[in-house]
Image: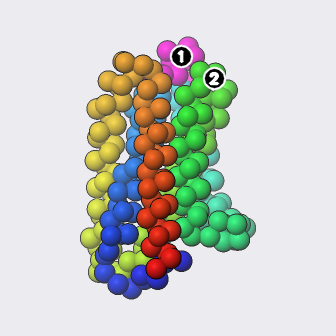
């Protein structure tokens, strides 16, 4: 646990704000290109594509609810992945899931899609929880909205660049999203672990 609860915003708070944006890049690219990617790569109908995305959203919601709200899920996280390691695991899961979704086999792509949405939803909940835990209510009134602004900004960027990157190479948005997420996870882990040692 961090020892900064109850004080104003510091650099960790702003690092987490950026993390909200980084976390949204993968799902942003997924939403921007998945329908056309699935249609062109796997020749699936719009109905099947819609059901796939709906299944991913449902799995993500159920997984995040179970892991963060149920007694068993909370006990599992606290026992094996206490904060902030739960955040590291979810961000790592997001990055790996994107690379999995880039594999040109339908079943593997679909599994990657399900994992991506599951880890993404769980990551969003954990990020909000950590940000709220280490921030005073006054500071949270600033950094809380900033996190959502970072998410929306990155969503705009992915909506614009996703189709452009797809035109260059269909799997390029997935590769970039997974790489950016992985690199940011390393940076975030280093910064947070160094902070915890102080």
Tell me the residue at 28%/55% (across/down): 149
- Residue numbers of the magenta segment: 36-48
Residue shown at the point (59%, 56%) measured from the top left: 89
In the rendered image, is residue 74 in sight?
no
For this view, does 138 lie left or right of residue 197?
left
Nearer-the-camera pick, 19 or 40? 19
In this picture, is 67 found above or below 101?
A: below
Q: Are marks 1 and 2 in contact (CB under 8 Å)?
A: no
Q: Which residue is mark 1?
A: 41
Left or right of 101, for residue 146: left
The image shows residue 197 at horizontal and vertical percentages of 50, 76
Given residues 191 and 117, the one toward you in this image is 191
Q: Quadrant of residue 111?
A: top right
Alpha carbon separation for disc pair 1 and 2: 8 Å
Q: Secondary structure at mark 2?
A: helix
Secondary structure mainly formed by the magenta segment: helix
Say what secondary structure mark 1 lies in. helix
Name the residue beneath numbered marker 2: 106
């Amino acid at each position: 646990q961090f020892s900064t609860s109850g004080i104003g915003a510091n650099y960790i708070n702003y690092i987490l704000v950026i993390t909200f944006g980084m976390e949204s890049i993968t799902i942003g690219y997924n939403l921007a290109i998945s329908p056309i990617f699935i249609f062109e790569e796997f020749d699936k109908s719009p109905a099947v594509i819609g059901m796939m995305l709906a299944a991913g959203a449902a799995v993500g919601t159920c997984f995040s609810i179970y892991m963060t709200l149920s007694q068993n899920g909370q006990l599992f996280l606290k026992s094996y992945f206490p904060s902030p390691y739960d955040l590291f695991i979810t961000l790592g899961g997001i990055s790996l899931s994107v690379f999995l979704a880039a594999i040109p086999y339908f079943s593997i792509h679909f599994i990657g899609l399900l994992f991506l949405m599951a880890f993404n939803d769980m990551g969003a909940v954990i990020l909000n929880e950590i940000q709220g835990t280490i921030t005073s209510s006054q500071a949270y009134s600033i950094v809380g909205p900033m996190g959502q602004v970072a998410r929306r900004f990155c969503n705009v960027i992915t909506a614009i660049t996703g189709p452009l990157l797809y035109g260059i190479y269909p799997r390029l948005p997935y590769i970039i999203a997974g790489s950016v997420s992985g690199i940011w996870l390393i940076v975030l882990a280093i910064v947070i672990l160094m902070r915890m040692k102080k």
